[in-house]
Image (cartoon, rainbow, N blue to C red):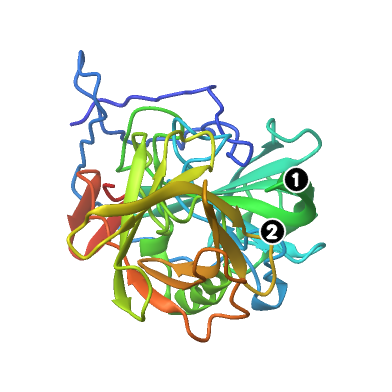
Amino acid sequence: MLVAVVVLLSLLVSACNSGGVPTTPSDTVFPTTPPGNSSPVTVVPPVTGAVLSIAMPIDGADIASNAFGLLPFGYHGADHAGGGHSGWDIEYRQGAQVRAAADGVVQAIEPDIIVPGRTKVTIEHALGAHIYRTVYANLSSIREQIILGGAVVRGQPIGVAGTVTATIAATAVTYAMSHFQVDDFEIHREGVDPKAVSPEPFLNAEGRALFDRIWLRSAFAQEPTEPFISMSRDQRFPLTRTWRLDSGDGPAGLSFTRTSGVAADHGYLVLTQSGTAIESGAVTLRVLARPFATIDLVTPTGPRLGLYDIVGDQMRLALGSPGAPRPADLGAASVYRTTRPVLSERVSRHAGDTRVEGPSP
């Protein structure tokens, strides 16, 4: 029998984080980490219950993309540069309700210590002996029906997504959002939120369809190097990602590099078919530009102005020649592809169950 180990962490690295590890469910068996091993280790016991099935915690009428749309699991930004993002940040229409992703029992209602005046709700989902939690943070108010120990059903309103005013690429923007997180008690990693896993594998068909709608409209400054919805939280920097031409008349390849998980600044290389770099410089992104995000590849001799759109392993890029005007749209964009990461060792597969801590880079 596995020894029960409760890992309580107060280290907080994300402004959108759930604010630490919620109260541990009773009678939960935890994986262990061998003593003296400083590397992240996962010990995955046999699955003892059904697999969690979730919907998106948002109604389709409430999705928004004034700021980013959706920020993915595992990506690195200023507030979670070291530990990686432990869930999804989902943007809502202002005033919209955050909804329960699955049936469960309210385990905790507590202040969101990251954002004063906001609340975090944790719902426990016990499927046989297999324990999951979903976490909903940055709530500006809670519905009166949400009470400690009370049952909730999938789709039930929990509370209102809190508004945030932030500066994104030197532009002030106000939006509503909630941090959504899935914890799986048969998964363990060292660090903050050790039970957090990517929500993506748990989506039911309806949830997947709504997620796809949101993800198509999402844009964030780290996309050129961290474009996937599920990425490794243990990423090391500098981080480089190469995009190869799939169709169109653009350069044969582009390589983007970030030197730090704190900043979203990228450098770039233009590559030949053989991979030889023939141009280099800095990247300027404007993700809030509408209807298309803009990209400037800046060299001492002048910038190349472009438009782009990234969805997973595909980038559409309309890029002008040095000194030429910015293209008007993506109608003649070249298509680039990048390699999808393989799943990391922190993945368990039992009877069709896939629970992802995050793919390898």
Q: Give the side of residue 264 with respect to residue 292, left or right.
A: left
In-front residue for pair 5/70: 70
Secondary element at tag 2: loop
Badge count:
2
Q: Mark 1 and mark 2: span between their CA atoms?
A: 9 Å
Residue depicted at 20% across the width and 36% down the height: 43
Q: Give the side of residue 340 with respect to residue 324, left or right.
A: left
- The answer to whether one can see residue 268 in this image is no
- Quadrant in which residue 350 is drawn: bottom left
Image quadrant where one finds the N terminus: top left
Q: Position of residue 120 (x, y in %)?
A: 67, 42
Secondary element at tag 1: strand
Query: Which amino acid type is marked by label 2?
Result: Ala
Query: Which amino acid type is marked by label 1?
Result: Ala
- The answer to whether one can see residue 133 in this image is yes
In-front residue for pair 181/290: 290
Q: Give the side of residue 33 with respect to residue 196, left or right.
A: left
Residue position marked by numbered label 2 in the rendering:
67
- Quadrant in which residue 68 is drawn: bottom right
* Disc 2 residue crowd, few under 14, some 14–19, many 20+, Cα 10 Å: many
Q: Position of residue 200 (x, y in %)?
A: 41, 62
Residue depicted at 49% across the width and 33% down the height: 81
Marks 1 and 2 close (CB-CB < 8 Å): yes
Q: Position of residue 13 (x, y in %)?
A: 55, 30
Residue depicted at 44% across the width and 45% down the height: 267
Furthest residue in direction bottom, as rendered: 331
Looking at the rendered structure, which numbered label has been put on residue 166? Answer: 1
Q: Position of residue 298 (x, y in %)?
A: 53, 51
In-front residue for pair 313/53: 313
Above-or-below relation of 225 to 28: below
